Amino acid sequence: MKNTLTLCLLLLAGILNAQTIQSPSKEISVAFKLTAEGKLSYSVTYKNKQVVNESLLGIALKDIEALDTGFTITNTENKSVNESWKPVLGEQSTIQNKYNQATFSLVQKDTGRKLDIVFKVYDEGVAFRYEFPKQEKLNYFIISDEKTEFNLTGNHKVFWIPGDYDSQEYVYNETKLSEIDNDKLNLNNGIAVKSIGGRYVVQSPLMMKSADNLYLNIFEAAVVNYPVMHLDVNVANYKMKSHLVPNAIGDKAYLQTPVVSPWRTIMVSDDARDIVSSKMILNLNEPSKIDDTSWIKPMKYVGVWWEMHVGISTWDLSGTQDASQKSVGKKPHGATTENTKRYIDFAAKHGFDGVLVEGWNIGWEDWFGNWKEEVFDFTTPYPDFNIQEISDYAKSKNVKMIMHHETSGSVANYERRLDRAYNVMKKYGYPAVKTGYVGKIIPRGEFHDGQAMVNHFNYVPQRAAEYKVMVNSHESSRPTGVSRTWPNYIAAEAARGNEFNGWSVGNPPVHETILPFTRLLGGPMDYTPGVFEIKMSHYDPNKKEQVHTTLAKQLALYITMYSPLQMASDLPQNYEKYSDAFQFIKDVALDWDESKYLEAEPGDYLTIARKAKGTENWFVGAITDENPRNTTISLDFLTPGKKYKATIYQDGKTAHWEKNPINYEIKTIEVTSKSKLKLNLAAGGGTAISIFPAK
Amino acid sequence: MKNTLTLCLLLLAGILNAQTIQSPSKEISVAFKLTAEGKLSYSVTYKNKQVVNESLLGIALKDIEALDTGFTITNTENKSVNESWKPVLGEQSTIQNKYNQATFSLVQKDTGRKLDIVFKVYDEGVAFRYEFPKQEKLNYFIISDEKTEFNLTGNHKVFWIPGDYDSQEYVYNETKLSEIDNDKLNLNNGIAVKSIGGRYVVQSPLMMKSADNLYLNIFEAAVVNYPVMHLDVNVANYKMKSHLVPNAIGDKAYLQTPVVSPWRTIMVSDDARDIVSSKMILNLNEPSKIDDTSWIKPMKYVGVWWEMHVGISTWDLSGTQDASQKSVGKKPHGATTENTKRYIDFAAKHGFDGVLVEGWNIGWEDWFGNWKEEVFDFTTPYPDFNIQEISDYAKSKNVKMIMHHETSGSVANYERRLDRAYNVMKKYGYPAVKTGYVGKIIPRGEFHDGQAMVNHFNYVPQRAAEYKVMVNSHESSRPTGVSRTWPNYIAAEAARGNEFNGWSVGNPPVHETILPFTRLLGGPMDYTPGVFEIKMSHYDPNKKEQVHTTLAKQLALYITMYSPLQMASDLPQNYEKYSDAFQFIKDVALDWDESKYLEAEPGDYLTIARKAKGTENWFVGAITDENPRNTTISLDFLTPGKKYKATIYQDGKTAHWEKNPINYEIKTIEVTSKSKLKLNLAAGGGTAISIFPAK
């Protein structure tokens, strides 16, 4: 009888506590409520359509009761925020942060433990997180599982990659939710270390499209001191559950109150442009922790790098390690003083900011694949790399050197040498470092995406900031807006980059039309576009590998793949060979006042126009997937009444990513804000346009 | 038929290959042979008595075939070595390294893999190790188990502590081998973190005594890049097997050829003095890797330390953390500028080299027991500890400051801050650091005694050497002679120290009569003797804790517990109160030309005479267990014909460790090399003697 009464009261409380939070536009609504048992649940509607069915929230804790049932609401707070902030570098000079917020303060009856659930509802989506207030009954605790559900309403189309604890460098699969199945993947894909978490586990950002043409995206923001969240998909009923990456002994996160989880985000719109242009993820991160950001600058760079990928030279002094992952016979070492000077000369001549050199330091003879702890010391150059001479030479040419710290996954080794490594950079004036994590992680048993490594990837930019060093990480966990907090974390790889085209099955033409809807939501990607010699047979007639785009699309990527750090990845001689096309790379800006997403369809096409910061110069990038595409864009973003000179870099008449990729045309025309341009994109093609005020 | 033939050939080969290696004295013999199946076996005799029955050798590897059977011998090399070397600091100025060696080169038929077994036979024992030569068929490999057997011949008496992966701070159990049982231990013993590896697992050094009065000791030397070896005991048949400490995922060691295992050692003698005085463990380590050792000096020190242990002051500024491991109400912070200056004054007045200060840096409010990663930064003093002022003051008084780096087990945090921590020491002129590892290890899942932590404990002195810093580690894995290779690794705790007497059941009177036969074989211990106020009721009438020795025995420990780093652990006011006894601590040397082990019986008594380096001064220490002891020692080690003044610090007539511990007498007499001294040691007592040439 008493139990029945309790149940009734709980039920009543549940109904009474059902609360709705709307987006400023009122198009998105979240309903939060307690179930009869005091479980936490939410659902989401968009324009009055259900997009997330009732889904439970909860956290399982190690050794103590789960925070997933028996809750009552003790307080609710609502607020509306509309503010703006200026990123140090970005797609736009000002970012609006506008949302409605509700905080539900909960107490778990049996344990007396307190938990807050906070929702922020933006015009383009919903974010919520768990907040664990400081309290007597919960101080240090260990998360053994997060039980956040995302119960979808239908068998959506989904762009997915497997939920791998160690890598995101996969080609996207485009299937129905019901067709997700990691067992059917071809894993001969060039990825060095794979640890797939289960047959139906996928990664976020997870981009979807419903049968009624709604675009949905599930992701997370501000992953700090917490593992990466993958998603367990129930392919029968389209329900998903958070799947946190474990540590060496199976725990998920070690926390101390007061502490918060990352934000779990669900974006939804009937216009894909709302998602791809969203700044919600950045908004959900903390403001910059660096006061003086004057030293954080965009960088366009070349590097002793692609030549190793195409098999011309090697990382190691002994001349056996190019990117082919097999013995290659004796080849020249790439990172010589002489070769580096050649790149410095090229950078200086064409106005590049920096030169990256990989393979400069001892250790490359045996760096890969053996879970070796003491690989690199990050301080000792090979004898043929005269770091003092190179540094002096670069300075004399007004070119910055970019340091390379490959850790081979031995994070323990890197951390114990951090200060020494950065002191070398300081000594020789390197303002930026590319870090690399190719290999199984040491401390052994940890994964790239676990809490300890997330902390490492956040810690390195923090330490680097003390040396005024910018960080570009490769093989890190994927960023979730951290560049707002640490703006010197200027770019990351954390997805399948252009390099895979050099020596593996590569990236299909559709790849770059998906990344902006997924990986790039978390922050800039060092995709390393700009490969002009598309086919590797150029270097070796036996090679079948190739970049899966036209040359013109390589140019357009400088616009569609936002990053304040952009590489011109091809060899100097190739740029000199196609110097007319190269002009676009020389001209293109890296930091922007405004970005206009003109057209967007995930997995099909993307067209963006951006205004270079502090100028009247615009740049347009348009890309397509494996299908040719004709479209017309309006230049109504230009200042009315003003005349501009537009140089259009487009696919040639017979261009085709596979059959004729280097076929391109360049024309210059006068345009105004009333102009409309017809763009003809080849299969796997693109168009890049520079628009300068007419003189 | 073919198999039978093979078997016969193998059997024949096995018999033919049986080989014997003798000690230079010919008293110890090792027989090494292959079994019929090509397994590796050895046995040991001493004076023609079997002391180790036939025991197998072998290594199990992860994912590939074990190296434990199917071997043939391809080569045997024998050599005799007789050399000597001079330790930087030590019990004697010259150490003889004399042994006969045999190297058996083996090949495993099925895999083609090569393995060498090397035996070194000394007059006091046998050492052997596995050597994995550089070879095509074995490069990187993972040890999943070591299958080294030590099959004993009887139910010996054994001094054992449980095979804990995280601590050696146990009281010794003295039982028969058949009575070993970790399930019967009382674990309410003050040890913070315990991870006992199994019911019948014990630690080495394992000291034993057979029914026919042979002393046996099983240990290891030169544990480098390898986990600590514990021993799995079969209590029914007295067979033991190596039990390596695992890492977070159960692996034991990650190695690359060429590489060697630590030495496995079996000491045996009918005179216990041969074991306790043996330098075999040191001899089995590599020579010093430090060229200029002029900065490595013995140190006698006092410290802001014992006052936290007895509950007078606290480590944390907020005043709640003394050693009682519970809330203590508000007490004064120990590490204040003023209090530190008091210790500096005391050190200067009495000729001490250094002052240790614990609790000087921020973080102590929440440092313990929560597996917290970011506890200390090792660089930021509490506001009431003016490090510049203290450092200047110490310099003006010619006293050295000793740094304290408590890591609370968060090795990841310490390693990433190593350079910053040591730069602070350099800035303020600290020549030595005491490190601490109280707590569960981070990287999480690792143990104090696993390969990764062994590497850390070896790495810290290596890095410290670059700053000319000496290291005294507490809660590290126990040393195995590493101080030969890194002589700046001046001392370690790594056993149950005197501190346990302050706030736990403490150390029984027998404790210090065992440690020299176990822990100290691996290197100097920072036992922190010299407690004069024996009973904690001195500080608080409610306290029942006490040091389990007489005051005189505390003095004798400066001789019986060899260390070039010795603390006078008690409070200045206590030394001033017993200033006559304190004179011995002021006088006693730390570095020696010679050491004479006059009497030794593990678990009963120990008497040592040592000659201070470069002088004619001798110091004698004699201790007993809970039983009183009368003995007569001859001073025939003194220079014949020379007169000396001996000051004898001995137990008073009614002295007793429990009933009357501070009862002592001091007398000064003239002695020569012909003198014999009657020593009367109380229950739990001791005698300390200083012998200076008469003027």
Image (cartoon, coloured by chain):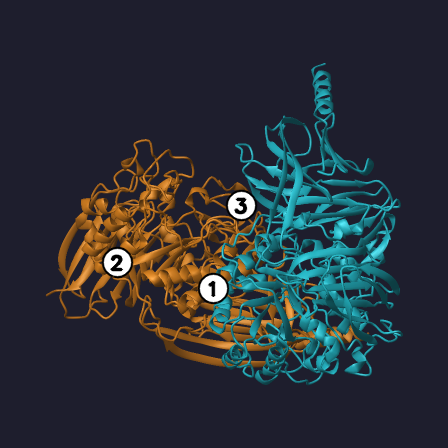
Chain colours: A orange, B cyan
Give x and y (percent) for residue A484: 41, 69
Q: Report the front residue among B333 and A288.
A: B333
Query: What element does badge 3 sit on?
Result: helix
Q: Is residue A170 left or right of residue B494?
A: left
The image shows residue B160 at horizontal and vertical percentages of 80, 54
Mark 2 burial class by Cα count in 10 Å: few <14, some 14-19, many 20+: some
Marks 1 and 3, the one that precedes in the sequence: 3
**Nearest to viewer (mark 1 / mark 3):** 1
Q: Amino acid at mark 3?
A: Asn
Percent x, y of residue B344: 59, 79
Reading the image, the residue beneath label 2 is A392
Indicate the chain on which mark 3 is placed: A
Q: What residue type is disc 2 on?
A: Asp
Which residue was labeled with disc 3? A182
Query: Which residue is found at the position 72% from the left and 48% from the top?
Result: B219
Name of the residue lying farthest toward the left: A695
Q: Choose top left, top right, bottom left or bottom right for residue A434.
A: bottom left
Determine whether, in the image, residue B422 is placed left or right of residue A379: right
Where is the C terminus of chain A found, in terms of image quarters? Answer: bottom left
Q: Position of residue B311 (x, y in %)?
A: 72, 80
- The answer to which of marks 2 and 1 sits earlier in the sequence is 2
Of the numbered discs 2 and 3, the one sitting upstream in the chain is 3
Q: Nearer the viewer, residue A140 or B320?
A: B320
CB atoms at circles 1 and 3 under 8 Å apart?
no
Disc 2 from disc 1: Cα separation: 32 Å
Q: Residues within 10 Å of mark 1 (few under 14, many from 20)?
A: many
* Tags 2 and 3 both on a single chain: yes
Q: Which mark is residue A458?
A: 1
| Residue A71 can be seen in this image | yes
Disc 1 sits on a residue from what chain?
A
The chain letter under disc 2 is A
Locate the N terminus of chain A by quadrant.
Answer: bottom right
